[in-house]
Every structure is written in structure tokens, then in C-alpha cells.
Image (cartoon, rainbow, N blue to C red):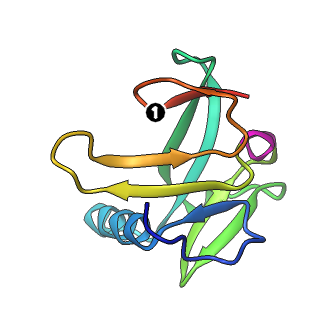
Amino acid sequence: MTQATQAPQRGIQMTETALKQVMALREQQGEDLFLRVGVRQGGCSGMSYTMDFEDGSNVREDDEVYDYDGFQVVCDRKSLLYLYGLVLDYNTALIGGGFTFTNPNATQTCGCGSSFSA
């Protein structure tokens, strides 16, 4: 895992590699979008990570917003209970590459890395 780029007080942390990847993906969308990170019920371990681009008009008053040099990551407070301290990374390996989640709150993680229990 590469070094996270933010101060420790941020609830959702991103590595430099992950930040570059989400900014490149956002650029392909052709819009000034933010990244929403959250959880939902489901997956092999009980909860699954969610991650998607959204328009800035969808930011709610009770959302937590983290700024990374002008790129915003947003998380709803209920999800943040399970994600606080999460490090989002991006692995460029040909096999097993993609976004990875290192969640200090997870008590169990499935083999695919996209679901967990807390």
C-alpha cells in the first residue's frame, strides 16, 4: 500500500495512487463530480463498500466532506460509523488490481475485498 495523502483527522483517507485514479476516471466523465463512499447491507460478509461519482448538488447537510486538492470525497454519517479511518488505495497489478479498502473497523473481510463485517 502506498502512503495515504491526507492528515489523520480525515475519516476517509486516500493514497496518492487512488487519488490519481479517481481523478482520471472523473475526467473521463467530463463533469466536475465528487466521489461518494459508503456501505450497504449485502455481500459475503454482511456489508459491501459502495463508491460512485455524484453531482455536487447531491451533497447533503449531514454528509462529511473531505477535500483532496480540490477533489471532494463525501460519506454519509451512518456509513462513516463503519468506515472511519478507511484507507482507499489503487493497485495497478494485472491480476487482482483495482481499488482496495483497508478498513480498521472490519472484524472480518471476504476474499474479494469488497465486503466486510464490523
Q: Which quarter of the rendering shows the C terminus?
A: top right
The residue under label 1 is 113
**Which residue is drawn at the image coordinates 69% and 78% (left, top)?**
7
Counting from the top left corner in percent of width and height, residue 108 is at 63, 25
User: Is residue 97 rendered magenta in the image?
Assistant: no
Counting from the top left corner in percent of width and height, residue 34 is at 53, 63
| Quarter of the figure with residue 5 | bottom right
| Quarter of the figure with residue 70 | bottom right
Position of 86 with respect to 96 (left or right) is right
Is the residue 104 above or below the residue 118 in the image? below
**Which residue is drawn at the image coordinates 70% and 29% (left, top)?**
107
Counting from the top left corner in percent of width and height, residue 36 is at 57, 52
Name the amino acid, label 1.
Gly
Q: Which quarter of the rendering shows the N terminus?
A: bottom left
**Which residue is drawn at the image coordinates 39% and 63% (left, top)?**
22
Foreground pick, 71 / 9: 9
| Quarter of the figure with residue 73 | bottom right
Which span is picked out in magenta? Answer: 78-82
State the predominant SS element of the stretch in magenta. Answer: helix
Foreground pick, 7 / 28: 7
**Which residue is drawn at the image coordinates 74% and 39% (left, top)?**
82
Counting from the top left corner in percent of width and height, residue 95 is at 19, 40
Position of 94 with respect to 12 (left or right) is left
What secondary structure is marked by label 1?
loop
Q: Is residue 97 visible?
A: yes
